Amino acid sequence: MSAMSDIHAPSGQESRSAPLELDQGDVYSKYMLHSRSEIVFLLRAIVQKGSLVTVYFDHGQSFLLTAVILVDADNGTLLFDMGSDEEMNQKALKADRLLFTTSLDKVKVQFSLNSLQQVQHQGRGAFRGAIPDTVLRLQRREYYRLTTPIANPIRCRLNSRREDGSSAQLDIPLLDISGGGVGLMVDPALREDFVVDTKFSDCRIDLPEEGLLVCNLVVRNAFDVTTKSGNHHLRIGCEFIDLPGTRLTMIQRYITRIERERKARMSGMA
């Protein structure tokens, strides 16, 4: 039985709101697998788990859902179930680059292929592609990420330099913070100020009871978010650049204290 035969998954026109990590190779290069044996082992684990795979093509404007159904290491090929939308299946067959993204035990897995062919497998249509030379396996976060207060948010003051030569001082609330970076809640009207790879120097974040954190940031991802109340904003993920050890210690001290206070409150409520 085909892995997708009982799944009526959506497929069609959908733009990715941010580049996949696979397209940011310089940033995530340390997570790339190059060993053929490791790649085959990982792909077979995905088959065993029955993980759904999203395939993006047409420069991210089209996608479909599938699953890996066979890893043939001897012939260097993969078989994928065909999607539920025949029009999207045909578009995928004509695409000259396809990006595959899935997860295995909550770890992101991504790879790309240059083409797919249609074949028959156990009496059903299937996609066939080559086993990729590299696979991105994005491990769990290296730093604990603390969600910051919503009612009285921590704010990040930064200076945006625009293409017309002008600059703007922005005061942006934080969504979260870790030793690796921060999440910002940005008005969609400021989208052009937070394009992926944009760098900000001398950003200033007041950490309560710890002091002023001065840092350099680079935008790594941007996602459109709609809250339960219907409000729209951009969630901007930023990475610290060359953060000195003393400032990292400041962040870790702040996170530890807030978590300790939260646990104390929870214990008091129990």
Image (tube, rainbow, N blue to C red):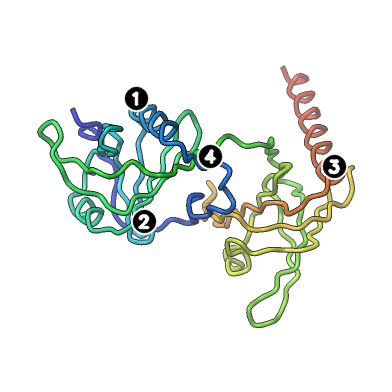
Separation of marks 1 and 3 at Cα, in angstroms: 43 Å
Q: Quadrant of the N terminus?
A: top left
Which residue was labeled with disc 2? Answer: 14
- Give the secondary structure at mark 1: helix
Separation of marks 3 and 4 at Cα, in angstroms: 27 Å
Which residue was labeled with disc 3? Answer: 250
Q: Nearer the viewer, mark 3 or mark 2?
A: 3
Please report the residue visible at 22 percent of the width from the left and 53 percent of the height from the top: 93
94 relative position to 254: left or right: left
Q: Amino acid at mark 1?
A: Gln
Which residue was labeled with disc 4? Answer: 138
- Give the secondary structure at mark 3: helix
Please report the residue visible at 80 percent of the width from the left and 62 percent of the height from the top: 202
Please report the residue visible at 69 percent of the width from the left and 37 percent of the height from the top: 143
- Disc 2 + disc 4, Cβ < 8 Å: no
Name the residue nearer the viewer: 22 or 73.
73
- Disc 3 + disc 4, Cβ < 8 Å: no
> Looking at the picture, how far across and down is residue 255, in whole percent?
78, 36
Can you name the residue that lies furthest to the left here? 123
- Give the secondary structure at mark 4: strand
Q: Amino acid at mark 4?
A: Leu
Sooner in the amino-acid sequence: mark 2 or mark 4: 2
Identify the image quadrant of residue 123: top left
Separation of marks 2 and 4 at Cα, in angstroms: 23 Å
> Looking at the picture, how far across and down is residue 124, in whole percent?
13, 36
> Looking at the picture, how far across and down is residue 222, in whole percent?
56, 56
Can you name the residue that lies furthest to the top here? 270
Which residue was labeled with disc 1? Answer: 48
- Disc 4 + disc 1, Cβ < 8 Å: no
